[in-house]
Image (cartoon, rainbow, N blue to C red):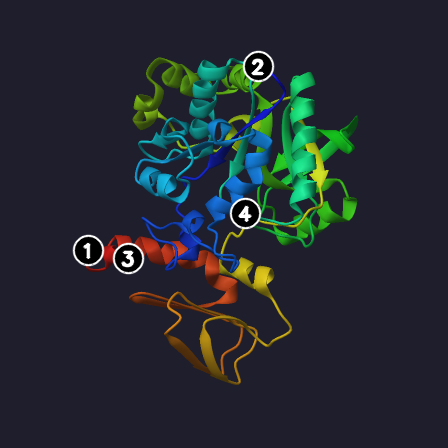
Amino acid sequence: MSNSLIPVILAGGKGERFWPLSRKHRPKQFLSLDGSGKSLLQATADRLLPLAGGWDKLWVVTSSQLASGVQAQLPDLPAANILAEPEGRDTAPAVAWTTLEIAQRYGKEAIVGFFPADPWIDEEQSFQQTLQAATELAAKEQAIVTLGVKPSYPSTGYGYIEQGEQAGFVNGVLAYRVNRFTEKPDRQTAESFISTGQFSWNSGMFIFKAGVVLQELNTYAPEMMALLEAQGAAAYSQLAKISIDYALMEKTKLAYVLPVDFGWDDLGDWNAIERLLKTDGANVEVANHVCLDTTGSLLYADDEQEVIVTIGLEDVVVVRDRNVTLIVKKDRTQEIKQVLKMLQDNPKFTDLL
């Protein structure tokens, strides 16, 4: 087996914090949010194709409800390379099941990378150089390699990775052992992390030999692995919901981090669109917007024929999509999930999801 990478795109997310634009059958990864005309999923596939060497080595794991949408978005992707989870169980089962399937097809020496479907990434040449370094490190070491993004502000919405001892240069990139992972700290802790210069944001990207991760998962998540090895996807109803960070990365002694500084944003909620598209204007407008004394706001309309009119607003997000208008203070966009729960509990509004 050569040291080529088999990239896997994690595309089962719901993108709820981008509601109402992101909905059940058209989640965030199917949307174009940067004005390029490409969906986030298509942009991610385009970034990874040169590393995969072609569509036959690119995989996607998604939900059964979204599998046909993935095929429509990526028509050149072989249907056999789309794994459809029968129900969502977070990222640990997705990584474990897909790695088992890839090991069965290509062997345990296969080098596998997992990548979220929906981040924004700039400087693709730097991204691909870093991935080549991660692939080389995973090929020669018992290593689970993750990419750590250089923090640009003390985010409380990202996980953090503390780098430990240096592990040397790989393909021009300096690698470190991982000391610890920390999930979503408070602002004071995030500020202290950044001040040390030893912490990176957890990008959610992982590269490893299939056999290495299967061995580690058998050590740290034996019940999940026993079910998946015996039943495959049929085991999902018996699996606990758990992320790969909690199930493995916080426990393994084989974690390495490659700190990177290419442009990256996980596009977690509507405020990310402001970071992505911010201009010198008073507002970020992806809509026909007429305003009087409105500043610091994001205005978004899916239909270019519609017009949003505002008077005297500040620091708000206004989104118009089909039969829903969302108006929310920018510092409360994380609470959109609570509203969706309210809609879900009311039969009158379930068609809005």
**Front-most of 31 and 196?**
31
Q: Are marks 1 and 4 in contact (CB under 8 Å)?
A: no
On the image, numbered disc 2 is attached to which residue? 109
Is 304 left, or right, of 294 in this rendering? left
Q: Residue at x 53, y 76 (%)?
A: 314
Which residue type does callout 4 highlight? Pro
N-terminal label among 3 and 2:
2
Question: From this viewpoint, is residue 330 visible?
Answer: yes
Query: Mark 1: which amino acid?
Result: Pro
Contact, CB < 8 Å: mark 3 with mark 2? no
Between discs 4 and 3, the one toward the N terminus: 4
Left or right: where 346 falls relative to 173: left
Query: Which circle marks residue 343 in the picture?
Result: 3
State the SS at label 2. Answer: loop
Q: What is the CA distance from the residue labelled 2 to the residue labelled 4?
A: 28 Å
Q: Which residue bears the numbered disc 4?
A: 119
- Please, what secondary structure does the residue beneath circle 4 have? loop
Which is more toward the observer, 4 or 16? 4
Eyeballing the image, is 224 above or below 304? above
- Of labels 4 and 3, the one closer to you: 4
**Extreme-bottom residue of the structure:** 292
Type of amino acid under label 2: Glu
Q: Amino acid at mark 3?
A: Leu
Counting from the top left corner in percent of width and height, residue 16 is at 40, 52
